[in-house]
Amino acid sequence: MHYQLLRGGTAAAAARRVRNILGSVLGRDGWMWRSHEVKLVSTSSGDTVTIGEISYKLKTPQNPELVPLKYLSDSLPNTVAQHLRWIMQKDLLGQDVFLIGPPGPLRRSIAMQYLELTRREVEYVALSRDTTETDLKQRREIRSGTAFYIDQCAVRAATQGRVLVLEGLEKAERNVLPVLNNLLENREMQLEDGRFLMSAERYDKLLQEHTKEELDSWKIVRVSEDFRVIALGLPVPKYKGNPLDPPLRSRFQARDIHYLPFKDQLELLYTAGPNVAAERVSQLLSLATTLCSQESSSLGLPDFPVDNLVAALHVLNTFPMLSSQQLVQRLYPYKSILGKDGHTAVESVLSRFELLDSRRQAAPSSVLSVCSSSDREGLADVTVRTADKDVTFQVPVGSKELRPPNSSLTFINTPSHSQLLAEMMQSHMVKDLCLIGAKGCGKSVIAREFAEMLGYSIEPVMLYQDMTARDLLQQRYTLPNGDTAWRPSPLVTAAMEGKLLILDGIHRVNLGTLAVLSRLLHDRELDLYDGTRLLRWDRYQILKEQLQFSDQRLQERSIFPIHPSFRVLALAEPPAVGVGSSSSRGQQQWLGPELLTMFLYHTVAPLAKAEEMGLIQGLTPNVPKEAAEQLLHLTHSLRQTNDPTAQSLASSLSTRQLLRICRRLSRYPEESVSHAVNKACLSRFLPSLARASLEKALTSCSIHDSPDPAEQTRDYSCVVQDGVLTIGKVSAPVYSPNQKMKVPDVLFYDNPQHMMVMEDMLKDFLLGEHLLLVGNQGVGKNKIVDRFLHLLNRPREYLQLHRDTTVQTLTLQPSVRDGIITYEDSPLVKAVKHGHILVIDEADKAPTNVTCILKTLVESGEMILADGRRIISGTFGEPCEAKERPNIIVMHPDFRMLVLANRPGFPFLGNDFFGALGDIFSCHAVDNPKPQAELAMLKQYGPDVPQATLQKLVATFGELRSMADQGTITYPYSTREVVNIVKHLQKFPSEGLANVVRNVFDFDSYNKDTREVLLEALHKHGIPIGAKPTSVNLAKELPLPEVKMTGYWTLNQGGNARRKLLCPTETRPVDVKGPAFLRVQSYPSSRQESRALSFTEEKAHWQIPMNEVNIICDVVSSDDRLYVAMCNPVTLYSMKERGDNIQCMELYDVFPRTISGVWQPFVTVAPLGSPLDGQVVLHEEQSNTVLHLDLVTGAVRRLILSPDGDQTPSRASNWWSSNEQQGGHKMCRDFSQKNWLLFYREDGNQLEVLDVLESRVHSISLPINLKSVFLVAEDRWLLLESNTNKKFLLTKPMHMVAEDSGVCQIHSISEDPVSSGHGAGSAEVSVPQMLSNEPLPNENLSAALDQKIVSPNRVLADTSCFVQIIVGFPDLMSPNEVYSCKRPADLSAMKSSESGSHTFFRGALRSSTAKRENCVSLLSANQVVRAIPPTKAPLRDIYPKDVTPPMTAAYLEVTDLTSKKLKYIPVPRSMTVSPYTNWLSKVSDCDVLVAALGSGSVVTVDMGGYVRLWETGLDTLQRSLMEWRNMIGSEDGRPIQITIQRDSGLDVSAPKHGKIDATNAPHVGGNQWAGGTGGRDTAGLGGKGGPYRLDAGHKVYQVSQAEKDAVPEEVRRAAREMAEKAFKERLKEIDMSEYDASTYERFSSAVRRQVQSLRIILDSVQAKGKERQWLKNQAMGELDDAKIIDGLTGEKAIYKRRGELDPELGSPQQKPKRLRVLADVSGSMYRFNGVDGRLERSMEAVCMVMEALESYEHKFKYDIVGHSGDGYDIELVPADKMPKNDKQRLKVLKTMHAHAQFCMSGDYTLEATEASIKELAREEADEHFVVVLSDANLERYGIRPERFAQVLTSDPQVNAFAIFIGSLGDQAERLQRTLPAGRSFVAMDTKQIPQILQQIFTSTMLSSA
């Protein structure tokens, strides 16, 4: 087992020494000699090497410097000797060998040991995926203008008889290595320069026949017989890489070089760590061996890097107190690379070997001192404090001055960081390091601090994804004379100069590229492309001694030493844990077995809260403490959850981002934390789930967004004054540039929202940040940036990125001039040089691996350019030395980057720029302007476009955008589109809006579903797209009976005391109870414009969100507010005519349904005027309750008018029963705007006048009993006596003051017919239904009476007349004339026929008069409008005979006194009707209530709560019709003419009347007849150039445009029949009856839109996955910039082209995502389906899943499982049998329905969820989803919500979501509050379920797609 290499005389001594060491270890019997000694025998004929019995004769090398050195150790383990013996056998046979085995330096060192032993020269090449055949055979170089071929390694080795060592065969691309096939097999190869390599035997045979000169002239070259190939590779199915090509494989002899056997390894380790207890060494080795076994790799654990154990033991040797577990963590950072299962597996092995000791042993806590070592230069003594002991050891250091720890100003030391630095020092002693940590956690800062402590110069190299091995090592360039040469990369210069090389982002770079470095990292040797070799320092020194060469000579042979201090420090982000799901994210598990052998790993743990706080306060001392604490609380609560959404949010709140927020808060302390967090996470564009969980986190950390009250009112302006720019509250000096022409200048209309964004940008700009603006397309990002730079007067450079942007195009563009390559600076380099602002547009279009080079530029201000120059920042480093060095560009202090990107995700599908680089910029979300701002801006674009049009546009687009946010439509419509529409309308005002909007929406005209959604939205806001100018449907006008004078009203003022009575008045204060505060709820109002497709009187309509049992009692309007009162329960709704929401106050608690269970309230509402705007008085008639409500604050006060009025009526009053008893109380509200109201009781004799402002009541006692009161004017009231209907006029002083309570007088009124003069017989007395309180305007009065007249007047309406006008009343005392317009029949006499179309199931109960009269007067429009039931409308006159009248709720009878016309406007039936029909009939005799609104319109509310606005006034109607026609546009059907203006003057001869045709035959064209159509120069219709239009009475035969465009009917019919036929065929095919088809259609149609949008999204995701990549090294395609020099030299493979990238071998196959829908099919679903349709919704949801995922089986594997009282795994759709057609899908739905109907009760939601999550977690899939559909009926079965929450999040691999369908009361809401954010949804309106499912899919499945 132990052998030695015996050389001359030292052998015996060495053997003795080894025997002594090992004897003591192994005991006496353990020592035995074994075979295979390696002997070197010197004889006269030359040296021979013998291994065992095989000997090899040495030759003297030609180039001794190429022979490997110092690979052989003093003692050779037996296994190694056996391997060497085998290689020697193969060498003697002349065969090529392939050493295969696990990753690590062992195979290479065995090969090198053999070559050192046999003194052979080596040609080493590390293959990578970029290796091409030129790298192996010959490469061209240009020397003085001519291209020469330079032999490469394979050719050199073959001709010179060297050994070619090929390392990493699995890395090379598939078809590169076969170029060697013939060389390996027959030792032959044809070279590019015409030479032919020939094997030694054949060459020697030829040489016997021919001379050497002849062979040379034939260009035949002899391959040396000593040429051998040693290939080193990994076994590929186990490791990643390309499998060996079979023909190549057959040419090699393989040898498995596994790790050294346990005992050999143990020996090595004992020698490495003599101070370490032997037991501990063997434990560590046992662990390593276990983790390399077959079993562990089947668990998916990567191999343990056994070769690094030696290094680890060196550390242990110095620090015996170090915990083994921590050491293992450095070698094998299992916590970062493995999932949960892996953890437990590794920890169980650790505990098995008693290595879990991190708790017992303290970690090194800090570095105490660093001082340069006295005895050897290049080393320093570092003292580290570990567990009360200070240990000093030596580490390599750089050339600069050392800096004691903790002395840096910019580095705040925290305990965890100082511990990390101490650990790094320990590892630095032996090996290169790698720091793993999330982005923004301070890796670079720690690295810089580490370097400064040790006096290293840093060489940062930013790695990017498509980096090639050349970029890492050497690049080609041209010398000034055109010769090609190689320039060493920063990595190589760092190695030679002994710097600290920082490889930033090794997780990004391809494994095959990094493998080039493995020899550098393991052996410190490197072979470069131009033949240069870098050797380890000590090997170089020995070589110098052996060969007696000077440095000079070695450098001529291009051999250089690597500086002994050179070290590599790699930085990486943590690998994606759990390989399954990560493959889809395009990030493979980068930390594989190969990389594990290269470094020692240190994890940068996230900071603890206290440490982070200290850090923040250290770096931003002025930050408000409270804000910083809130911020940290939030961040840490997000970081600690195991919810992936929260984790991703936490990643955007990295330490770096927190510091940025705090810097900003310390400058602007008044800003809110939530604003900063939302900005950092870009919450505006997060998927809805993530946004919800962010909001939940914010509220749980009690960070509230305090809306700044001044925010709305503050006007944002920007001013430039005296060279200072001020935006909002922030000012900055204006820049004075030297290149004026680069300052952008842009047309920009200021609007507040963009100003706010710019103010925000300016704040960050002043803090020195680089900015990132993210937003949808067309929201003005470019405009904002250009305007911003224009205001600041900063010159800009502009870069537009796209798919093909490469790192080269970002930095330098190479080009060739006169054979010399020159580089053009890109805008980026120019901006850096001159201090301009670089605007990078469309940053998300470029691949993220390209844009990430911006990171070093932003972070450290350093960047290396392709031509060898480098940018360094002026602040870091020493600028003085920098400026002197050549090739340095110092970054100008004014340089800044402004990056613009679209938001991540669908439909932009760019690359997630924000995700990759978001935290190095300060991010700003740019949104479309808010409606006000947008309107103001559009006004500036289109000053002549009517305001109404602009409002419609703004409203429509606002709605479309919110739909895009919810995911109903995919395209986010932006301001850019609106602006284009407005510009068009501004220039061509006659074109209709409906036509112009098509310029935007025609893109969507072929997608049926999107089109429907769009049309709906456009029509809702009244953009009549698709309407024809002819579709005007106004009500038919009937003539009005003549207005005749019918009598007089006379005021009796005689002295008779009975006739003139004084009424005593008393005044008392009002007793106010309260206030109580009720909740004012706000519902969104879905106001629909009604004039979308045709023009009618109806303007708009919307639904009040009321209960179906509510009964509408009263409607009243005040200004543009509408109040609707309901009873049962009493509720008040208030809405603005154009508002977005409806306020609602439930007064359920104020009017309890108590008194003996039958008392039903009836309420009237009176809106108050200024200064009490927005407040109302509510009066309940039964109990005379008066409430004062404030709808803003929700305050309710009860006003008690009479001292005794607080008792309830003793007997329950059934006012809807037939026996009428004492009347209710009434309120007169005509003057409520003046804040006074009048109350009276029917049959009572008291008037109570309530003055709300003074809160007093004036009570007036009357001598008569009242029937009703009409307030004719403020001081004159008309009273009706209760039994006789006699009228009295009460006059009162205008202002009642308490002291002299003025006297009210009553005058009786006598009514006389015309015939008998005054005072004769009394006419039948009319009972007014409505009496106006204002006079008709004089011109209206004159028009109504057909005579010019000026006089006071009032309009009155009763049942017998359409209208009555009382002239002179109430101000003139002389007899007042009454003009009436009689009805043909009295309304009250008309019986409402039972068979009437509208009587739902009532009418029989109409026993008494209704409470509401439904009659209003529109005085300015000269109209009276009343609502009458359909039975009382003259339907025969309105509709022709053959037309059936539509079903209506009522007709609005409009009596127009100006045009003397009568119109009946039908009011559509209400959608729903309350079940309390008999009660409804009490309220109104038809199904609607009417109120006047504004001057020319009325509003109706039907019993289903549907509000409709009607325009009845003639003037306003005509105006609206004009506007409507303009919006449709003037397509009047004239054919469009194209004229070319010629200046010859022959175009139009002088206009003339033309000849008159006596026969009057129609003429068309011809320029001679008058009265023709379509001609020229003559009078006629529709022509051109004639003097006037002349119509000779002919029909102008012009087909209207609409008819031309219409498709002939028979064609349409044929298309319809074809579709029907196909449908029936399909049904027959799947054997489905038409009844079944229609049943299925019911479910399918309900979710069609969501299915469609889901499929669109899935498609696009699929398309994105298929995006092609650049394939390099192609022989055709586009020129690859990186290969321009190779092109000069004449190489072929210098092109690149796009192609499908084959998946990387060894990367896991992409598995479909696994989805399970758990549908609740329990009994309660069936039971409550009637209430809220929950079962049908679940069926729809299931239907949607089945339809949307059809034909995506390869991406989604789903099954649907039901749960109910019968159990929790009722299989509905098994995963392997997904339903293929409608019939199978219907069967699933039927099963659900039937099961819910017949199952047992009980609830298994929990068990089902738990079981499903467990089951899915066991399956192999990319991602797992469980969606639970359930009703929130958990409490009933005693299930705690906390328990449910626990189940939902029980397995981090499975994303589980709960959707609660339907709930009784607020169960679901309460549940949702306890469940984790973003995991549960409440779908009360079950239409949301598909929407919610869509959200779940899009936000989770797509985040990973």
Image (tube, rainbow, N blue to C red):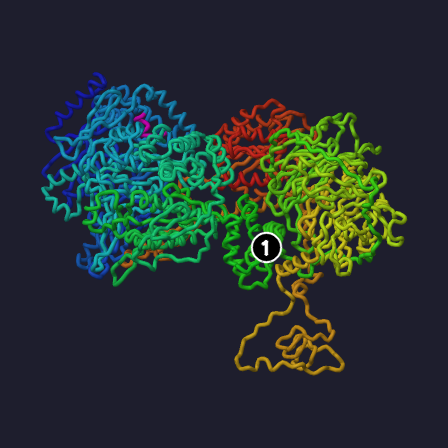
Q: Which secondary structure dominates the residues rendered in magenta?
A: helix
Residue 988 vertical position relative to residue 1562 in the rendered view, above or below = above
The one nearer the camera, 1383 or 1539, is: 1383
The picture places residue 236, in percent across and down from the top left corner, at 37, 39
The reply to whether residue 554 is in sight is yes
Q: Say if the magenta span includes residue 328.
A: yes
Look at 73% across and 73% down and name the residue there: 1594
- Amino acid beneath label 1: Ala
Give how far across and how far down residue 184 sits, in percent. Answer: 29, 46
Instruction: Return the residue nearer the eye: 1313 or 703.
Output: 1313
Q: Is residue 747 left or right of residue 71?
A: right
| Residue 526 occupies quadrant | top left
Whether 122 is among the magenta residues is no
Coordinates of residue 1856 in the picture (x, y in percent) = 53, 32
Within 10 Å of disc 1 (Cα), the crowding (few <14, some 14-19, many 20+) is few
Residue 73 picture quarter:
top left
Residue beneath disc 1: 948
- Give the magenta-colored segment's residue range: 326-334
Q: Which residue appears at 48% of the width and 47% of the height?
A: 927
Q: Quadrant of residue 538?
A: top left
For residue 1652, side relative to residue 1246 (left or right): left
- Classify 1308 as above or below 1368: above
